[in-house]
Amino acid sequence: MRHSKFGVITLLLFGIVISLTGIVCADQVVPAVPETQALSTVTTADVVGLAMETDAGAWTLTNNAGYIPLITDPLVGHWPGYGIDYGGRDDDVYDNYEELVFNYEIYLRDINPGGSLTDYLQYNINDGWKSDAALQAWLIGQTSGIHTGALYPGQVQYTTAYDANIMAQGGHTAFTKSMLINTGNKVIGQSNINAQTGLTFIATADGGNVVGSENLMIDGAGNTTTASDRILCPFSAYPVDIIPAYCNIVQAGSKYDLTIGSVTTNANTRFVGTDATNPVVLNYDINVKPYSTSQGQILASGSAMAYLKAHIQEARGNGSAKAEDLTYNEQSSAQGTITAFTKVIAYQSGKSLL
């Protein structure tokens, strides 16, 4: 009796909520590409013996990098602006670039207010405008496409990755996993990636256990961009029409190793949209609880861990100097007879309307 009363260690860890919210200086969602995709799977299993589930995916998305004032001259290394003296060089490429910049202002004022750089350059090509076609094609190439090196001026790029692994052996496993990936524009309350998992396990032989792990990451980087063309509310960009540069990465996930117990997890993220006031989000939660039977509940037994890692870097205004650098790490774990283990992680970062 002494053993049954004192020999069992019960660990009770209640829910923890972590929220990192960017105010004024923050991430901005990236518009979807013209053709969008949706992937959806649902897996269910009820197995005595060996059961395995593996998921892995990565996704990178970038914007159309904006306007000529945010584009550098490939030959002089900075935005030339019209009226700049190129040292007396008689070079049609320089002259044409200077003329492109000057006429873009006229295009925005008289022809297509709010038009993008690509719209403007394509307009020139279609209209047979006299600027150098090769230079226009080069500029169009610089305003789009995934970049593996330094970002172009005005470019915003996101990468998200998800992986999960579950292996159960020597026991009875009941398992459900749903996975949704949607590359379209999303609003508050919707997700681009949403993974939900639920399982129960009880060992039926010596050495039987279930081991699981799950990780979700979002990595966003952006150069300075304008705000008025990225925000639905016409008053939100006042008094400064700038979304500053940033580089933010957030990771969350969990691991568990149980001989008996019930586990549910939920992982989702959103970073695709048209309105920069809809924040970028990452949510993750895990709940480890007792195994339910018709005779009652049996406490979970084994170990569980969940973590959060974040590195936030932000600029102010239209400068490139870093104005904020935040690093945060957190890990919670339990081992033994587990009455409850719950961790809830929430990250959001978006431009303030103020």
Image (cartoon, rainbow, N blue to C red):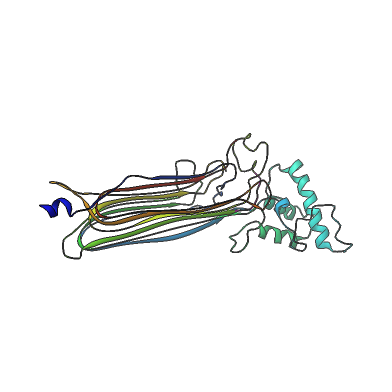
Dominant secondary structure of the magenta stretch? loop
Which residue lies most toward the top here?
235
Residue at the location (71% across, 50% down)? 120
Callout count? 0
Give the quarter of the figure containing the C terminus: top right
Side of 233 relative to 134 (left or right): left
Residue 256 seen in the figure:
yes
Looking at this view, is 274 or 155 the one in front? Answer: 155
345 falls in the magenta region: no
281 up-or-down from 237: above or below: below
Side of 155 relative to 12 (left or right): right
Which quadrant of the view contains residue 252? bottom left
Looking at this view, is 191 or 290 the one in front? Answer: 290
Where is residue 76 shown, x and y percent of the image? Answer: 78, 62
Start and end of the magenta stretch?
222-226
Residue at the location (73% across, 44% down)? 108
Which quadrant of the view contains residue 210? bottom left
Where is residue 241 shown, x and y percent of the image? Answer: 67, 41
354 up-or-down from 52: above or below: above
Which residue lies most toward the left here?
1
Side of 334 relative to 236 (left or right): left
Where is residue 186 shown, x and y percent of the image? Answer: 49, 45
Residue 33 seen in the figure:
no
Where is residue 287 shown, x and y percent of the image? Answer: 31, 48
